Image: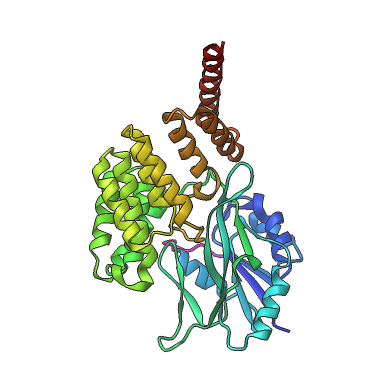
Amino acid sequence: MKKICVYAICKNESQFVERWLNSMSEADYIVVLDTGSTDDTYRKLKADSRVTEVKKQVIKPFRFDVARNESMKLIPDDADILVCTDLDEIFEPGWADYLRNLFETNPGLNRVYYTYAWSHNEMNEPQDVFKYGKIHDRNYHWVFPVHEVLEAVNEDFKEVSINVGKNIFLHHYPDKNKPRGYYLDLLKLSVEENPDNSHVRMLYARELYIQKRPQEALEEFLEVLKMPEIDDVARREVLLNSLLQVALIYEELQNYDEVLWYCQEFIKEDRTFREPYLVMAEVYIDMNMPTLAEGCIEMAKKYAYQHYSWVERAETWTSLLEDVESICMFNLGNYKEAYELGKKALAHEPSDSRLLKNVNEFAEAYIKQLQSNAKLID
């Protein structure tokens, strides 16, 4: 039977240790490289019999690829299937037996793609759900200082992979208070090391936007769209995400002509994502053109399906459609429908003050409409 080794890096993640080990203990081995914890993370891991090996090693200057490659050195020699996770992640139960059987019945398999939820809303519904590929054999190593990826050790190596979809589902529950300011410097370094890689450049642009530097982010995304490799089929998601992010930044800047143009460019490339339709609907609502917004919403319903791609926004498949449509219906004077849709959106995010305010406003307008109609009947 194939043996599984989970390997991880960590720093100051004591709060996650027990939950993570409960999930990862389906594996045959668990190894961890602690990169300099000052809390009791290392002690907890060292004391737990489920951990095969834990080592403390400070890496200076810190890079994620170096840390992950160092953690791989802890993997026992007889491990066949390598599973990289972080301590703030957990698998749905049964993942290891499924994985062993998959490798046993598919000779030559060297990498597995599965479903990953990067975030969850307050109702614990998965958001930012996309395909992930951190299950592999020994033919891979890690590259890039941050947002690191697996790459074949030998250039002539051929990947043989399977996408198992939700049969393996990994959930991420991050520490939202953990700083990420150093990501920007690492991404800048990554761009310097890989100047012709549009994916790396796009990640740098995205981080600028996350760090609330929209103008710089816009300039970077526009440069990404000019890169020669952007039309390569392997960079499809980079192209789509860059078009979407440019549209979103222009929406923030209230440059609606540019928003509509970039959304249309996105649709030319792929009409099956909800994102551009809903962004255009938001713009038409702001421009007091609710009929056009309604048309865009109907297109989102008609053509779009969930791709499980990182191009999709977090709320796209939870609250976003009903949220946008409820506002559209309110502006069209369809207060009952606005109220019902608003309640559906609020059910996903019950503590969202904006959604709650909308529902109350829609309800008030609907009651007034009913009272007005009653007076006309009298």
Q: In this view, does 273 lie to the left or right of 375?
A: left
Residue 13, image x, y percentages: 61, 53
Residue 114: tell me if it is visible.
yes
The one nearer the camera, 310 or 205, is 310
- Which quarter of the figure has residue 73? bottom right
Q: In this view, does 221 lie to the left or right of 309?
A: left
The one nearer the camera, 239 or 272, is 272
Q: Compared with residue 105, is residue 279 higher up or lower down, i.e. above or below? A: above
Q: Does the magenta stretch include residue 61?
A: yes
Magenta region, main secondary structure: loop
Q: Compared with residue 337, is residue 115 higher up or lower down, i.e. above or below? A: below
Residue at x 34% of width, y 38% of height: 284
Residue 203: tell me if it is visible.
no
Outermost residue, right side = 49
Residue 310, image x, y percentages: 46, 58
Boundaries of the magenta span:
57-63
The one nearer the camera, 55 or 186, is 186
Residue at x 24% of width, y 52% of height: 219
Residue at x 41% of width, y 62% of height: 61
Outermost residue, front side = 377
Q: Is residue 326 magenta?
A: no
Residue 280, image x, y percentages: 35, 45
Q: Compared with residue 143, is residue 35 higher up or lower down, i.e. above or below? A: above
Q: In which quarter of the image is the C terminus?
A: top right
The one nearer the camera, 189 or 164, is 164
Residue 70, image x, y percentages: 52, 72
Q: Quadrant of the N terminus?
A: bottom right
